Image (cartoon, grey):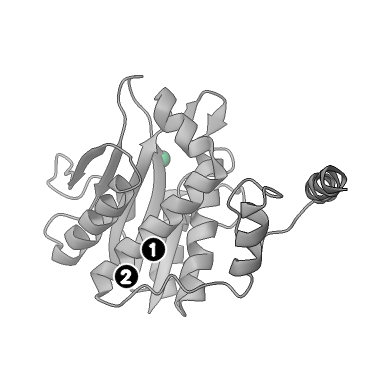
Amino acid sequence: MRICIDPGHGGTDPGTEGFGITEKNIVLDIAVKLAKLLEQEGMEVILTRDRDVTLTPNERTDLINRSQCDMVVSIHCNGGPVSAKGVETIYGYGSEEGKKLAENILEQIVKLGVKRRRAYYKLNAKREDYYFIIREVEPVSVIVECAFLTNPSDNRLLSSNSFRKKVANAIATGIFDTLGTDYSGKKHWADEYYERIRKEGLVTDEHMLDDEVTWGEFAVVLTRLLDRMEGES
Ligand SMILES: [Zn+2]
């Protein structure tokens, strides 16, 4: 199974902005987290971009069509009036598999407490799929509009690293639900160690266990440990 993850926008195209955060960065982070989760499950993953670069629609669709992947998930954040919030997914008109995938991903993101909007298709004046990332690619393709950057409560969620990890996990679950295979949510070998230091309060957030740690972050963890030792002596 080969799956293509497409973080929307990038480079000179920032996408939507809201309260100081930018769509291109948020969706890249979710996409990279999702890719890691899928790879842990033995899937082959292709990212249309793994850093902040500009891709034209043509470059994006060529890359996808050449990759011979089975499925495309394009990740976005929504923008709109300040009151608009929630998750939407979009599939190709007439695609049963796309519809199923879009509905399953929507369902999983709703479980995280994001308002349910809809899974839908959208056509242009020529009655073709409106979005190029669905219209111009050969594999089944869906767009996930995770939440609204322009809404204060959705924005707060998207700003949180642990929420973005949960969204990646929700999308992975939606993909496995659609494929009819079990998502083991396979444990990382270091999960129990991480869980222990999290319970002890030495770390406070959820992280991908293969992410790099800076000296600054390392110093914070060691300081918490020193404080704890001093408290006990
Ligand atoms: Zn977008």
**In the structure shown, which secondary structural element does the residue marked by tag 1 occupy?**
helix
The residue depicted at 14 percent of the width and 44 percent of the height is 126
Task: Look at mark 1 in the image and give the residue it sits on.
Answer: 172
In-front residue for pair 67/159: 159
Dot 2, crowdedness within 10 Å: few (<14), some or many (≥20)?
Answer: some
In-front residue for pair 139/113: 113
In-front residue for pair 25/128: 25
Dot 1, crowdedness within 10 Å: few (<14), some or many (≥20)?
Answer: many
The three-letter code of the residue at mark 2 reads: Phe
In-front residue for pair 79/105: 105
Judged left or right of residue 26, residue 83 is left
Judged left or right of residue 232, residue 50 is left
Q: Quadrant of ligand 1?
A: top left
Task: Look at mark 2 in the image and give the residue it sits on.
Answer: 176
Examine the image and state in which quarter residue 134 appears: bottom left
Judged left or right of residue 93, residue 82 is right
The reply to whether residue 82 is in sight is yes
The three-letter code of the residue at mark 1 reads: Ala
